[in-house]
C-alpha cells in the first residue's frame, strides 16, 4: 500500500494532507496523480462518486500552480453550486500550507458583486458553474487566456443539464496548449464525444468497470402498489434506528410534498431543490451535516456535490430515467469505501426498469420485503435496549429520584421488573404495528396483486367512508400524488387510505372510518395553488359533494359527470343557467343523462337559452290522416 509521499507531491501539500488526516491514497488517486503530473497529454479519468476524485485532480493541479502569480492559472467546471462549493473547500484544505494561493468559487444564487470583488483581488484557481462563468466573462471580469489547466468535473452531468453550448463557448476562450482533465463517474457516448471534441490526444484512467455501480453499495428493491410507496418508505425508516439517508424524487414539487408529509408524520426531514435560495440551501445542508435532520429529500440536480459522511441509505422514491443518474444517486452512500444501501421503492410496472439497470450497471439488485409490523417493533425494541446499555447514568443529578425509585421497586424480583418494564415501554410500539398490513406485492401471482396477503379496502374498512375532494387529473394528480397530498395535509398514515378514483376535476378516496373526520377537518380553509379545496363525505350535502339527484352528466350531482364543486358548471364555471353546466342542466333544471328515470318525471324539453330568455319550443303539428 503506497503513501502520498510516493506520488511526487510537494512538501507543502504533503503537510496539509497530514493535518487533515489523509494518509493513504484511494485507487483513483494512486493511478491518476502520477499520470496527471507527468503526462503531456490530456487525461480522462473514470471513477465512482465518493472515491476521492477531487483530491485526484486537485493535488496535481496545485503542483502546476505559481502562488506568486496573481493571474488565473487553473479552472474547474462543475454542474451545480453544491459541487462547486465542495470542490473549493477541499482545494482550500489541500493548499493550506501553500502560501499565497487564492481560490474563488463562482456560481449562481450568490452575490455576483462579491464574486467579482474576490476575482479582482487576484485568484489563481477558479471553481465555477458554466452559467455564472459566462456571465462574468460577458461583464469583462474574467480573463481565461492565462489558464494552464482546465478540469471538467462530473462532465456527464453537465451534458445532461444542457451545458454543451456553454462548455464550447468557455473552452474556446482558453489557450489551445492548456491541459484538459475530464473526470466522470460514467463514460457515456456523450462524454466520449465531448472528450474527442474538446481534448487533444488523451490517456484514459479507469478505476473499476466503466458505468458500473460502486462495490461497497448494496443495491436493493422492493415492490409495492403505487399508493403504498409512502407507507413503505416510513416502514424502512422505522425499522432502522441508525438510518441516515437521502430520498430522491423526480421533481422539486414532489420533493417538497414528500418532505412535508414526513415532517407531519413526526420524522426529521427536509427538502433541497432548485426553488430554494442559496441561504435556504445552506441552512438545510448545515442541519443535515449536523444530523439535526435524519432524512434529506432531494432532486437529482440538487444532490450533486453533496458530500456527507456516513450516509447509510439512498432511497429512490422515483426511479431515474437514465442509468447514469442512478449511479450518481447511489454514489451519495458507500463513500470512501464505507458500506451503504441503495434501495428502490417501485411499483409492479417498474420491475423491468430494475432489470435494465442490472444490465447497464453490471450489478445485481437484491429483492427485499417491506418490513412488517412485528419486525419493526422488534427492531425498535432492540435499538432501545442498545441505547439503554450505553447510556451514562447521571447519579448526582438523579440522586434523590434514584433513591425513591429503589424503595418503590425493591419488592419486585429481577425478572418481574424486566417484564413490567418491557410491557410498559413497548406495548404502544407493538400495538401500533400489530395490525399493520403487508405492503409487498406478491410477484408470484399472475395478476401481481397482493390480495392473498393484504385485505381489500372493503375488508380493511368494514364501514369504509368515502371522501369527495374537488381535485383531479386536471390539477396534475394521480393516485400517488393524491396519497401524498392527503397524508401531508391530514398527517394520517398512508395505510389508512383505501381505494382511490381519480377523475378529471374531482376524486373519491376511501378513508378508514375512525380517521375520516380527522382527514376531513384538516382540509378546512385549505387551498391548492391559490384555489379553495373542498371535501365532504361522498353522497353528503356539504359544499362540493355529489348530489343525490338533479343535474350532472351521467348522474350524480350538479356539474360535469357529477360531483364537481357547486351545483353547475364545468370546472367550477356556470355555463348553463340555474343548475345547468357542461353536458348537464337545461333551463328548467333538467339534465343530460341525469335526473329522474325515463318516465313522466323526465324534464320537458324547453329549447335553448338566449340573451333575453328562451326560444319558444317549436309547435308540434298533427300528423296527416292516412287515406284509406
Image (cartoon, rainbow, N blue to C red):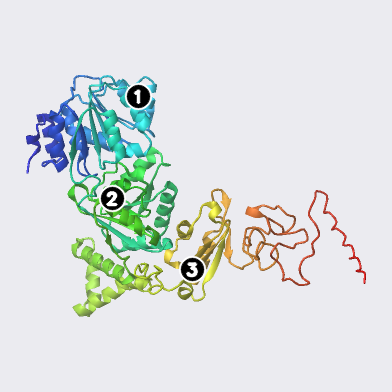
* Image quadrant containing the N terminus: top left
For residue 393, above or below residue 129: below
Q: Quadrant of residue 399?
A: bottom left
Counting residues from the start of the chain, the first of labels 1 and 2 encountered is 1
Q: Which residue does the numbered mark 3 point to in the structure image?
A: 515
Considering the numbered disc 3 on the image, is that residue within a helix, a strand or a loop? helix
Q: Which residue does the numbered mark 2 point to in the structure image?
A: 360
**In-image side of 386 versus 301 (left or right):** left
Considering the numbered disc 2 on the image, is that residue within a helix, a strand or a loop? helix
Counting residues from the start of the chain, the first of labels 3 and 2 encountered is 2
* Image quadrant containing the C terminus: bottom right
Q: Residues within 10 Å of mark 3 (few under 14, many from 20)?
A: some
State yes or no: discs 1 and 2 in contact (Cβ < 8 Å): no
Counting residues from the start of the chain, the first of labels 1 and 3 encountered is 1
Residue at 33% across, 32% down: 129
Image x and y of residue 486, in percent: 48, 59
Q: Residues within 10 Å of mark 1 (few under 14, many from 20)?
A: some
What's the distance in space between the residues labelled 1 and 2, CA to CA? 44 Å
What's the distance in space between the residues labelled 3 and 2, CA to CA? 45 Å
- Report if residue 82 is visible in the image: no
What's the distance in space between the residues labelled 1 and 3, CA to CA? 57 Å
State yes or no: discs 3 and 2 in contact (Cβ < 8 Å): no
Circle nearer the viewer, 1 or 2: 2
Q: Quadrant of residue 450?
A: bottom left
For residue 174, above or below residue 594: above
Image x and y of residue 67, in percent: 19, 22
Q: Which residue does the numbered mark 1 point to in the structure image?
A: 116
**In-image side of 125 versus 26 (left or right):** right
From the viewer's side, name the closer residue of 614 and 373.
614
Amino acid at each position: 500500500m503506497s503513501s502520498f509521499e510516493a506520488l511526487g507531491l510537494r512538501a507543502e501539500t504533503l503537510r496539509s494532507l497530514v493535518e487533515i488526516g489523509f494518509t493513504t491514497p484511494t485507487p483513483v488517486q494512486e493511478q491518476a496523480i502520477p499520470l496527471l503530473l507527468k503526462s503531456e497529454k490530456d487525461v480522462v479519468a473514470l471513477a465512482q462518486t465518493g472515491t476521492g476524485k477531487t483530491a485526484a485532480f486537485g493535488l496535481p493541479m496545485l503542483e502546476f500552480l505559481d502562488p506568486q502569480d496573481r493571474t488565473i492559472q487553473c479552472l474547474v467546471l462543475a454542474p451545480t453550486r453544491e459541487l462547486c462549493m465542495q470542490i473549493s473547500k477541499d482545494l482550500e484544505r489541500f493548499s493550506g500550507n501553500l502560501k499565497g494561493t487564492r481560490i474563488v468559487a463562482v456560481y449562481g444564487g450568490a452575490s455576483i458583486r462579491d464574486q467579482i470583488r474576490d476575482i479582482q483581488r487576484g485568484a489563481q484557481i477558479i471553481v465555477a458553474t458554466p452559467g455564472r462563468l459566462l456571465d462574468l466573462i460577458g461583464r469583462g471580469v474574467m480573463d481565461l487566456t492565462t489558464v494552464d489547466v482546465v478540469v471538467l468535473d462530473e462532465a456527464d452531468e453537465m451534458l445532461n443539464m444542457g451545458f454543451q453550448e456553454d462548455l464550447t463557448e468557455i473552452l474556446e476562450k482558453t489557450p489551445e496548449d492548456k491541459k484538459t482533465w475530464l473526470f466522470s463517474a460514467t463514460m457515456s457516448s456523450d462524454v466520449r464525444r465531448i472528450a474527442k471534441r474538446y481534448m487533444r490526444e488523451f490517456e484514459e484512467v479507469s478505476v473499476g468497470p466503466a458505468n458500473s455501480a460502486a462495490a461497497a453499495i448494496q443495491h436493493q428493491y422492493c415492490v409495492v402498489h403505487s399508493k403504498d410507496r409512502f407507507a413503505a418508505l416510513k416502514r424502512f425508516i422505522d425499522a432502522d434506528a441508525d438510518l441516515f439517508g437521502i430520498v430522491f424524487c423526480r421533481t422539486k414539487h414532489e420533493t417538497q410534498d414528500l418532505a412535508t408529509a414526513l415532517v407531519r408524520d413526526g420524522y426529521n426531514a427536509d427538502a433541497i431543490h432548485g426553488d430554494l435560495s442559496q441561504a435556504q440551501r445552506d441552512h438545510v445542508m448545515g442541519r443535515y451535516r449536523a444530523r439535526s435532520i435524519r432524512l434529506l429529500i432531494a432532486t437529482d440536480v440538487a444532490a450533486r456535490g453533496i458530500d456527507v459522511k456516513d450516509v447509510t441509505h439512498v432511497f429512490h422514491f422515483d426511479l431515474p430515467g437514465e442509468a447514469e443518474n442512478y449511479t450518481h444517486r447511489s454514489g451519495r452512500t458507500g463513500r470512501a469505501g464505507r458500506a451503504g444501501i441503495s434501495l428502490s421503492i417501485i411499483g409492479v410496472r417498474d420491475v423491468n426498469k430494475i432489470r435494465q439497470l442490472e444490465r447497464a450497471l453490471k450489478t445485481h439488485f437484491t429483492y427485499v420485503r417491506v418490513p412488517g409490523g412485528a419486525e419493526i417493533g422488534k427492531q425498535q425494541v432492540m435499538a432501545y435496549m442498545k441505547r439503554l446499555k450505553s447510556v451514562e447514568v447521571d447519579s448526582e443529578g438523579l440522586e434523590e429520584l434514584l433513591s425513591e425509585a429503589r424503595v418503590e421497586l425493591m419488592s419486585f424480583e429481577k425478572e418481574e421488573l424486566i417484564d413490567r418494564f418491557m410491557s410498559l415501554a413497548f406495548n404502544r410500539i407493538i400495538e401500533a404495528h400489530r395490525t399493520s398490513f403487508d405492503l409487498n406485492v406478491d410477484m408470484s401471482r399472475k395478476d401481481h396483486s397482493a390480495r392473498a396477503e393484504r385485505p381489500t379496502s372493503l375488508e380493511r374498512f368494514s364501514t369504509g367512508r368515502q371522501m369527495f375532494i374537488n381535485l383531479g387529473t386536471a390539477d396534475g394528480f394521480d393516485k400517488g400524488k393524491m396519497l401524498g397530498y392527503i397524508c401531508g395535509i391530514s398527517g394520517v398514515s398512508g395505510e389508512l387510505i383505501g381505494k382511490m378514483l381519480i377523475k378529471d376535476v374531482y376524486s373519491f378516496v376511501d378513508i378508514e372510518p375512525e380517521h375520516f373526520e380527522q382527514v376531513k377537518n384538516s382540509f378546512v380553509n385549505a387551498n391548492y395553488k391559490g384555489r379553495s379545496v373542498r371535501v365532504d363525505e361522498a353522497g353528503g350535502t356539504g359544499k362540493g359533494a355529489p348530489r343525490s339527484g338533479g343535474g350532472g352528466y351521467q348522474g350524480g350531482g350538479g356539474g360535469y359527470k357529477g360531483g364537481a364543486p357547486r351545483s353547475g358548471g364545468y370546472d367550477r364555471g356556470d355555463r348553463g343557467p340555474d343548475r345547468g353546466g357542461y353536458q348537464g342542466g337545461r333551463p328548467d333544471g333538467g339534465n343530460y343523462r341525469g335526473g329522474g328515470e325515463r318516465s313522466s318525471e323526465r324534464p320537458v324539453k324547453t329549447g335553448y337559452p338566449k340573451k333575453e330568455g328562451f326560444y319558444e319550443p317549436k309547435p308540434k303539428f298533427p300528423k296527416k290522416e292516412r287515406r284509406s
